[in-house]
Image (cartoon, helix red, strand yellow):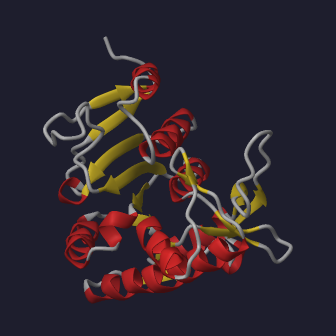
Amino acid sequence: MNRLTIVKVGGKVVEDPKSLNNFISEFKQISGSKILIHGGGTSATKLASKLGIETKMIEGRRITDAKMLDVVVMVYAGLINKNIVSKLHVVGCNAAGFTGADLDLIRAKKRQHPEIDYGLVGDIEDVNTLELRLLLEEAVVPVIAPITHDGNGQLLNTNADTIASEIAKEFSNYYNVYLLYCFEKSGVLKDQKNEKSVIPHLDYNTFSNLKENGIIASGMIPKLENGFYAKRNGVKEVIITNTSNLATGKGTRLQLEIKQ
């Protein structure tokens, strides 16, 4: 099978002009077919604040009422998505921007939780691999914003890490899939203040212990949960890394069990 690289890039990278330019330069170096999924939470939070809309987060996941949904659609599907697409064309990547509603790419259902009302947050039900595969065959680089839909006209805010994981899982039937989570840190750190404390290999039991002890927290939790989910479902490699190491593969590699 051919190789497919799926990159999820975090908001703090795409929202800073210098970091974004560095990312675009590194992303170009990745050979073969590729899909880019992006965040943009910091920009959404800033705009919401200017509009007098309170931001509420639970374990790195945004509570999304109707007003907040308007904000995230404007920021994710509009400003950030098109900014990334335009910069990719500068370096010769034939990029096209999408949400899950475009081409019916990603359907989701409103999250149901026994204790927490997440609002208009979507849990993915289906990924339209056929349309995405046709795009890849035409050497298009899909750039996907973290907005899905329910098939009945309702847009839903959906975690970008989850979208990357689900797309990676579905494409593992057709490609050797490499999933890279790119953010501002060098990898998963033992000490958040020490960039050199990268954990080179991380298994699920160690992750659970670090989470329980508060060493891994906030937005890193859904990132790793989704990474391990992808690894359990046929994805060849899952790597947590930063822009500088995007093309080299350095960072934290996830593994299901401790290697002896």
The foreground one among 56 and 257 is: 56
**Does 159 appear above or below 195?**
below
**Does 199 appear above or below 48?**
above
Q: Residue at (40%, 42%) from the top-left corner?
A: 238
Residue 260 placement: quadrant:
top left
Q: Position of residue 8 (x, y in %)?
A: 42, 59
Q: Position of residue 215 (x, y in %)?
A: 35, 30
Question: In the image, is 29 to the left or to the right of 127?
Answer: left
Q: Residue at (17%, 58%) from the top-left corner?
A: 244
Regarding residue 120, the answer to whether it shows in the image is yes
Q: How many numbered tags mark residues here?
A: 0
**Does 103 appear above or below 161?**
below
Q: Going by the picture, which residue comes out furthest to the top?
A: 260
Regarding residue 39, the answer to whether it shows in the image is no
Q: Position of residue 246 (x, y in %)?
A: 25, 56
The foreground one among 2 and 40 is: 40
Question: In the image, is 14 to the left or to the right of 142?
Answer: left
Q: Residue at (49%, 73%) from the top-left corner?
A: 44
Q: Position of residue 217 (x, y in %)?
A: 42, 38
Q: Going by the picture, which residue comes out furthest to the front?
A: 52
Residue 206 placement: quadrant:
top left
Question: In the image, is 11 to the left or to the right of 25?
Answer: right
